[in-house]
Amino acid sequence: MERNDKKGRRNFMTKFGLGAAAMGLGNINSFAFAPRVGAEVTKSKPVRIGFITDVHHGFCKDGLERLEKFIDDASQRELDFIIQGGDFCHPTPEGKECIDLWNSYPGEKYHVLGNHDMDKGTKQQAIDFFGMQSNYYSFDKGDFHFVVMDGNYIMEDGEYKDYGNANFYIEQQRRSLVNPEQIEWLKEDLAKTDKQCIIISHQAFDEIWDGWSSPSRFAVRKVIDDANNRTDFQKVIACFCGHHHVDDHSFINNVHYFQMNSASYFYVGSGYGSDDSRAMYEDSLFAYLTLDPTGSIHIEGKESKFVRPTPLEKNHPDAPRLSASISSRIAQFSPLK
């Protein structure tokens, strides 16, 4: 696993159909990437991943039960690893049951830091509590290279500072940032690998309709574009995130961006939720990703419904955009050759 040498809400953009319609596509989409030129590549088997995000243990009453359903289901499958996309639990004694349940999974498992993981502690405390060795890192699995990023920095007095003890409740332009050292690390990390890459973060690096996009998204996308333009194959093929509690997909400069829905709820604000400010989902949401080196990304999603009264029944202004599901999708790409 490659690591740096440092220390370690919202839902749906019209259910992929809006973006697909704009591109003239259906629910199953195919995009061609520039293939690598050179010697024939021996392909290994597909990489299979269990993905859950935004469990919100300590804020969502049944967060532990939702995680348990994922762990139970994932344990019955043959997966290469599982990963949680952030907003998992607080680094407190109350959060130990969540970590213990996660660690009961018998296979490989990885963490992404989310902003709410630092509501009741420092970033270092969250890193230690999760058992992470670094806040951003990378690793190889099969024919793919995975990069886990940390978008939990604020700008204060002209300096990038770690999230910690809920210090990030400030204007959007000064939070959800990727620090410059990490940008440089990303450049170097992508340059070192000859595998096709998947980037996983908490905050999105594409666009989000509610205006909460990461201000660092343009810097990250430039690194991605430069990496792809400097090689004779598509190096970065997809990015996955949580944070926004939406079920969405976009396609920017030949890179897929998947926004994965929360396991638990969409934050609708006081007066609009089935549980105070939360529009709860009837079922725990999670997904299974299959990355096939012969040329496809399969997402096995999960359908659910909002617990009543629903955002639509409560006349939430964004109700038509909201979803209580993770869509199943297939995206095709040109493999290494």
Image: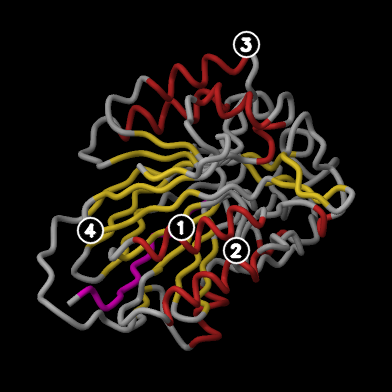
The spot of residue 242 in percent (x, y) is 56, 50
Front residue of 321 and 210: 210
> As shown in the figure, which amino acid type bears the numbered disc 2?
Phe
Circles 1 and 2: CB distance less than 8 Å?
yes
Residue labelled with disc 2: 205
**Viewer-side residue, 206 vs 281:** 206
Disc ID at residue 93:
3
Q: Residues within 10 Å of mark 4 (few under 14, many from 20)?
A: many
Give the Cα separation between the discs numbered 1 and 4: 14 Å
Q: Residue at x 28, y 59 (%)?
A: 291
Q: Position of residue 58 (x, y in %)?
A: 66, 23
- Dot 2 or dot 3: first in sequence order is 3
Calculate the distance from the C-alpha at mark 3 to the C-alpha at mark 1: 31 Å
The answer to which of 267 and 255 lies nearer the viewer is 255
Is 193 above or below relative to 314?
below
The region drawn magenta spans 325-336
Q: Residue at x 29, y 58 (%)?
A: 144
Question: Tag 1 or tag 3, which sits nearer the N-term?
Answer: 3
Marks 3/4 in contact by CB < 8 Å: the verdict is: no
- CA distance separating discs 1 and 2: 10 Å
Under mark 1, the amino acid is Ile
Q: Residues within 10 Å of mark 2 (few under 14, many from 20)?
A: many
Residue 91 drawn above or below residue 56? above
